[in-house]
Image: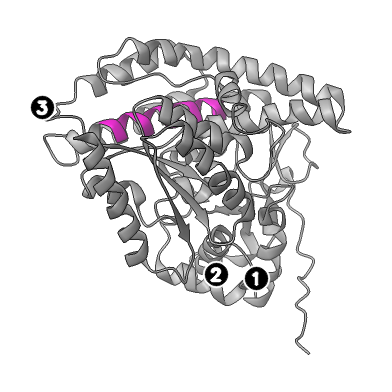
Amino acid sequence: MTNIIVPKRAPEFSSRDKAKYTILCPQMAPIHFALAQTVFAECGYHFTILPDVDRDAIEEGLRYVNNDVCYPAIVVVGQLIQALKSGKYDPNTTALMISQACGGCRSTNYATFLRIAATKAGFGEIPVIPFSLNITNGDDAKGITVGVSVLKKLFLAFLYGDLLLNLSNRCRPYETEPDSTQNLVQKWLDLLNGDIVSGRKHDIAKWSQNIVDDFDALPLRDVPRKPRVGIVGEILVKYHPGANNDLVGLIEQEGGEAFVPNILDFVLYCLTSDEQRSRYSHVPLLNGLKSTFATWLIERQRDKVRRVLAASGRFTAMHTIRHLIKEAQTTVSDCNHTGEGWLLTAEMIEMLEGDTPNIICVQPFGCLPNHITGKGVMKDLRSRYPKANITTIDYDPGTTEVNQLNRIKLLMAVAFKNLK
C-alpha cells in the first residue's frame, strides 16, 4: 500500500505580507506577463515571472506530480519546484502563485497539486496562492488584493499584449532585417511599462495608433502572403512557447504565418459564461449583471483599437465577443463552458470565415474538455468549410517532438497545395 502524501498546512498569504514575500509565478504569455509584472510591482508585490521552461523543469514536474495530471500542471509545478531548488530564493520569504479554474478541468486541483509537490520537495512551509483577484484594500484579505485602478492597468496590459502579439506575428515572417520585429516589440514593452506604471490618464486610441503606425512602417519583403495558420486549444499550451515547443517559430520555419487569438477573448468568454450561469443555474443574478457590465466596458475600450486596426494598411481588426458567441451558436451551445468551451469553436469559425483556413488545435494529452470541444466539432466544420485544413496536436512529456513536427509539416504541405 502506497503512502499518501498529505501537504503541510503552509502559512496563508495575506496582503499585509506583500512587502515581505517574493512571489514566484510561472510563465504563460511572455509579452502579456512582462506588462502584468510591472502592474503588480506598482501595487507593492514583488513578482518574479519565471523564464522559459526547459527539460529539467519538465523532469521536476514528473518527479513530484502524479502521471494522471495534464501537461500544463507538470509544466508549471515543475518550473516552480525547479526555481525553489535553485537556491536563488529564501524559502522563508518566498510564496508560489498558480492559476486555478473550476468545473470539468483538472486545473481545479492545481493549487493542491502544487502544495503536495512542495511538501514532497521539502518546501512545505512556503505559501501557495491560488490566482484570484480580490477587489479590496483590506490588509487582512487573503491572496492577491487589488483596487479598481489596478484592474484597469491589468486590462491595459493585456489589451496591449494582444495588440503586440498579433502585430508581431503578422510582420515577423516578412521582415527584411532579422530581429527587427522583436526589437520593435521590446521598444513598446519598455514604453508601455513606463506609461502603465505612471498612473496618468491613458489614451488608448492615441497609443494604439502610435503602435500600429510603427509596425505599419516596419520594412517588410515584397513577397506573396504566406499560408496563415491559426492556433487554438488549451490556454497555456496555446500561448506558452515552452509548453508548445515554440509552435509559432515552427510554423514560420515551415514557411507559414502564425495567428494566435487574443487572451482578452478568453477573459470575456469567462465573463459571458457568468451570464449564462446566472440565467440557467443557481448563480445569483447580480453576478451575471456585473459580468455583463464588465464585458460592455472592456469591449467599449477595445473598439478604439479596432478602429485603428481597421484603418491600417497591413492589419485586420478583431471581432467582438458577441460576434464570436453568434458564430459558435451555429455549431455548439453557448452554455458549453467546459475547458475552452464554445470559445474554441468560435475561434475556429472566425479563422475559417476569414483568411485562415489552416488551424492547429493544441491540447494536453487526455484533456477531455479540449478533446471534446476541439475534436468534437471538427467534422461539422469540415463539412461546412471544404477548404478547412485542421489538425490536432497533443502535448505531453512522453510525446516526441518528431511526431509533432511531422503533423505540422503535413498541415503545411496541404496549406501550400490549397494556396496554389
Magenta: main secondary structure: helix
Q: Is residue 419 left or right of residue 233?
A: left
Quadrant of the rendered structure where residue 184 is? top left
Residue at numbered disc 1: 117
Identify which residue, 360 or 118, lies in the foreground.
360
Q: Which residues are magenta?
A: 153-170
Residue at numbered disc 2: 61
Quadrant of the rendered structure where residue 403 is? bottom left
Question: Residue 15: x and y, percent?
Answer: 72, 43
In contact (CB < 8 Å): disc 1 and disc 2: yes
Q: Is residue 67 left or right of residue 391?
A: right
Query: Outermost residue toward the bottom?
Result: 1
Using the rendered image of the protein, determine whether residue 27 is visible from the camera's viewpoint: no
| Residue for point 63% across, 55% down | 368
Q: Is residue 247 magenta?
A: no
Mark 3 residue type? Asp
Quadrant of the rendered structure where residue 3 is? bottom right
In contact (CB < 8 Å): disc 3 and disc 1: no
Q: Secondary structure at mark 2?
A: helix
